[in-house]
Image (tube, rainbow, N blue to C red):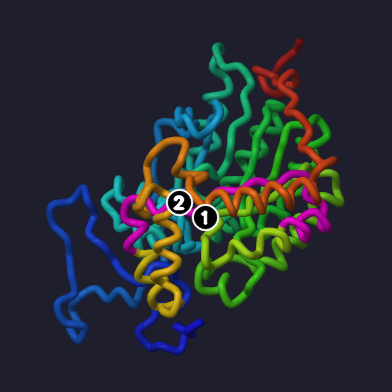
Amino acid sequence: MKDPLKNEDYIKGRGAQIKTPNRFLKQASVTEHLEGIDEESAFNQRTQIFYEQSKRVVNKINSPDLSLMYSLNPYQGCEHGCIYCYARNSHEYWGFSAGLDFESKIIVKKNAPALLEKFLLHPDWQATPISLSGNTDCYQPLERKLEITRKLLTIFAQYRHPVSIITKNALVLRDVDILQDLAKDNLVHVYISITTLDEDLRRVMEPRTVSGKKRLQILEQLANVNIPVGIMHAPIIPGLNQDEIPGILKAAADHGAQAAGLTVVRLNGSVGKFFEDWLRKNFPERAEKVLNQIAGMHGGQVNDSQFGRRMHGTGVYADLIHQLFSKTKRKYFATRTMPAYNLTAFRKGGNLQLF
């Protein structure tokens, strides 16, 4: 592996290294000359916060790839900077780049708790699990200061409503008190995303996230206080981390995980351009092999939007990944499962309900 962090042109602490045009905009700003001091520099990307006064925050997911579910994302954009993130493309709807802008221009839905409570109070709403972080991580760095996710969890606890969380940030441990309260009535599932336990790979692929070792410790600490916890080994990228499947699943089981899932990488929209640039800068000796194997899982193209194939892949490489994952999962998770959600505890009136 080449060490790009020794290259003075490499943007340290960020995943994307280039800024591509927004497909929805007719104009784009470019740097014609790097020495132009009056031009915006891609190498000076401080995080900016934009506050959005949303009208709603709970969204129904209609994708055939997912069972009927609802999601809630208090943040748009994510400082974690994971180079493969499919959510990057959604940043273009806001007029931003899916690359560096996605990592450095974060949109905050500060009124999300009030909107969630309004949603739960609707007379026609029937309790159905709502997922936090369907798009971006609800425990990304800004959450430490803003505490929007904690306020959302307080609402879920007040109304005894089921919720699921997926994160790769240790900040989830801050909210153990609320998570325990939800867990005692089978109202919460927590999934920790683990892509790799190779620190050299993680620090360039997911530059602002905690280490794989720390994520295993998060699993153990949640499991030790009886909070249902599993892992998402995602995305699996042939030529980069598929050989880690047995080790990651064993380590997760050893640290108390009750379930394990996976998705394979898909480089939809602009993500393919960022990923290829990142791959050639970090792993030039195997870039072609990795890209060809990714394309082999997605009908010959790295950009795959076909339902049923985009998250699981097809072909030889995908089959090998799923066979290895299934065999390993049977070995370490055969007797483990997440508890079923309790849909009967929902209080339509929250703590104000008398009967």
Q: Residue at x 39, y 70 (%)?
A: 288
Which residues, given as a range, are shown in magenta?
249-273
Q: Residue at x 75, y 13 (%)?
A: 354
In percent of width and height, residue 70 lies at 53, 30
Image height check: is 202 above or below 320? below
275 sits to left or right of 145: left
Asked which secondary structure carries label 2, the reply is helix
CB under 8 Å between discs 1 and 2? yes
The residue singled out by tag 1 in the image is 317
Asked which secondary structure carries label 1, the reply is helix
The residue singled out by tag 2 in the image is 297
Q: Within the magenta stretch, is there residue 267?
A: yes
In percent of width and height, residue 189 lies at 71, 39
207 sits to left or right of 280: right
Q: Which mark is on residue 89?
A: none
The first of marks 1 and 2 along the sequence is 2
Q: Residue at x 18, y 51 (%)?
A: 25
Q: Badge 1 local density, few (<14 within 10 Å), some, or many (20+)?
A: some
Image height check: is 341 above or below 195? above
292 sits to left or right of 213: left
Total tally of numbered discs in the picture: 2
Classify the position of the C terminus by image quarter: top right
- The answer to whether residue 204 shows anywhere in this view is yes
Q: Badge 2 local density, few (<14 within 10 Å), some, or many (20+)?
A: many
